[in-house]
Every structure is written in structure tokens, then in C-alpha cells.
Amino acid sequence: MKLVNDEIKRGSHMTVQKLNKKEFGLAILNGNASGIIVALIPSAIISQLLAIMPQTDIVKTLTMMVTLAQSTLPIIAAFAVGALLKFGTIESASMALATFIASGVVTSHGGQYVISGSGVILNIMLTTFMASLVTIAFHKLLGQLRAVFEPLAVLLVGGGLGLLTLPVMIAIQDAIGSVVAAATQTAPLVMGILLGIIFAVLIVSPLSSVGIATAIGLTGIGAGAANTGIVTASLVLAIMSLKENSWGLFIAHFMGSPKIQMANMLSKPKLFIPVIIASAIAGGISSLLSMSGTPFSAGFGLSGFIGPVTALNESTGNGIGLRVVIAFFIVPIAMALIMKYIFIDKLQLIDAKDLKLPEV
């Protein structure tokens, strides 16, 4: 009881009211980006390695661990947002309940509830935003009764609103998938350029690049171009931000996911310029080199080396190994260094501080 009382007292000093709109928005974006790092990167790094290993009990257990971890994304994202907004534990936990329910992680099959996947990231972000506002609204209203009624109030109102917006967010993601599918009907070189750009943008947006690639069944050269676009985006952002971020965060860009830069990208749209230019060139070159992939590999970058390993297995012709090295390593690294020179060193249009990440 003492712990609960202490928490109630601490919660009464929430400072979220003092945040301006920009700070509030950045807290939502950065919190969700942190959730992505914690929940999704473990699976991205080792899931494919585990898949090709002998399926012993230990390997199966490890697979279960990283797979289930992905489904905690809405919970972790909500707690991270709450921490950045200086909410107390009760407030953050209440937001986590609402976000989990509205995330799309839980589905109903034959009268049973099934937990699967990481949810619809667009709706997770929207729900953390709405649940934050609901939490603030109930903060003073409930007073000392917060510990009893706030979890229920935020769950019903914030989670209920999130459930209402979930079909809309799914429809938006499906519509974007249709646009991506249309790009696959163009000439190979043009397709490579377009898919390189599209997936480079998707990977740093609230949308799921893997989900869209899987939904439209993106395969062959198109999948290879999409993957190299993501690889290039991750290296461009990693190298351009190296001066401001730790080595751990530098590596997280490409061995984890460049989606960790989502908050910076959305708050500073100029950062998309070098990413789009570099990924367009890389996607086009990938197409010329006939790099192939699968719907699953298309949405990943270098995480777990899924892209290059899949290209080695799926591509045909002579010199596959050399072509993979060129498409997935030489070209992306070269483009990243060139973009840094042009946009940071020469034009000074971008500052490395624009890409600074909060330590997690």
C-alpha cells in the first residue's frame, strides 16, 4: 500500500502539461521508436540464423523468445512514451493496456484470442497519442482515486478509440501496398529505382515494410531492389549520424533497423532527401545486377544478413557472390559516404545533430 501511495503522490507531479506541442509530438515519436528497438531488433538479428539451425529444444526456445518479444511492441512503446512524458508508473501502465488492446496484436479465431505479430505500427503510434491525451484528461479528474479507476478509464476510452481507428490504419497500409504493387509493373530499371525509394521511405516511417512486401507478394528483382533500398537508407543514416551517436546506435541502424530514426525523419523532412537519392541509385543498380529476393527478405535490410543471404540463394547467373557484395555493401557504403560529403560537409544542408538519437 505504501508503494501505491508513493506512486500516486509521484504521479501528481506529472510535468506533461509543461511540454509544448513539438515536445509532446517528439515524445510520441521517440517513444515508439524506442519500442521498436527493444521489441523488434532481437528477432531481426537472429531469427533467420535460428531458422537454419538444427531445431533442438534450445533453438526452439530461443525462437519462441524473440518471436513473442515482437508482440510486446505496443506495451513497450507505451511505457517509453510515458517515460518521455514524465508519467508515473500507473499512468504509463494504463497507456500500455490501451495500446496493447488496440494494436492489432490480438485477434479472435473461433472464439479464442490469439496473440501474433507486432501489430499495426501506425495504430500503435496513434493510440499512444490518444491514450496520452486521455491520461492527461483523467489525471486531475480522478485525484486520489487514480490507482483504482485510471487503468480502467484509459483502457476503455484510449483503447476504445484505438480499436475504432485500427481498421482505418489497416486500410491506409493496404492502400500504400497497392501503390507499391503498381511500381512492380514498370520496366526493370525503373522498378528498381522506384522500389528502392519506396522501401527506403517505408523503413523509416510508421508503416511496416515487411508487412507491405508480404501482403503484395513482392518477389524476384523487385524484392532485391527493395531490400537494397533499405540497406542503403540504413547506412546513409548511420554514417551521417556517426558523429552524434554512440557506436552501439551506429550499428543498430543496419544490424537492427533504421526505423530508430523515425522521429528525426518525420520531424525534419529534409532528411529524406539524401535517403531518397541514395536508395534510388542503389535500387537501380540492384536491378541491373539482377539481385533477387522473397516477400520476407524484401522488407529487411542487413538485419541478420537476411537480404544478402537471400540474394545469394535466389539470384541466378554468373558471379553471384561478387554481385551481392557490390549491391549490398559497396554501393550502399559508397552512397552513404557521398551523401554525407554532399549534404553535411559541402552543402551543410543537414547537420549530424539532426540525426542524434536518445540513448536507450
Image (cartoon, rainbow, N blue to C red):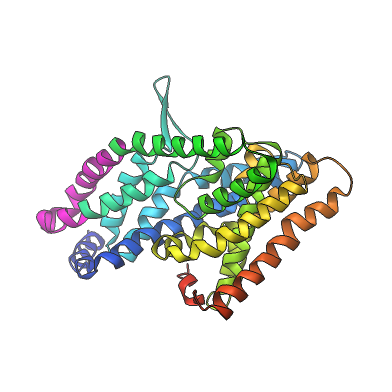
Answer with left or right where residue 9 lies relative to residue 279. left
Percent position of residue 265, x then y: 45, 62
User: Compared with residue 4, is residue 74 higher up or lower down, i.e. above or below?
Assistant: above
Q: Is residue 59 visible?
A: no
At x 30% / y 41%, what residue is drawn? 162
Q: x, y (%) of residue 106?
A: 41, 35
Residue 345 horizontal side relative to residue 78, left or right: right
In magenta stretch: residue 12: no
Of helix, strand and loop, which mostly describes the magenta segment? Answer: helix
Between residues 235 and 91, which one lies in front from this camera angle? 235
- x and y percent of residue 205 in the render? 47, 52
Q: Is residue 153 magenta?
A: yes
Is residue 256 rendered to the left or right of residue 109? right
**Which one is in front, 193 or 19?**
193
Picture quarter containing residue 183? top right
**Residue 195, visible in the rendered structure:** yes
Image position of 196 with respect to 275: above or below: above
Question: Which quadrant holds residue 223?
Answer: top right
**On the picture, is 114 further left or further right than 49?**
left
Q: Which residues are magenta?
A: 135-163
Q: Residue at x 54, y 39 (%)?
A: 180
In what quadrant of the picture does the N terminus appear? bottom left
Can you give x and y, in whole percent of width and height, for residue 227 in the image? 65, 49
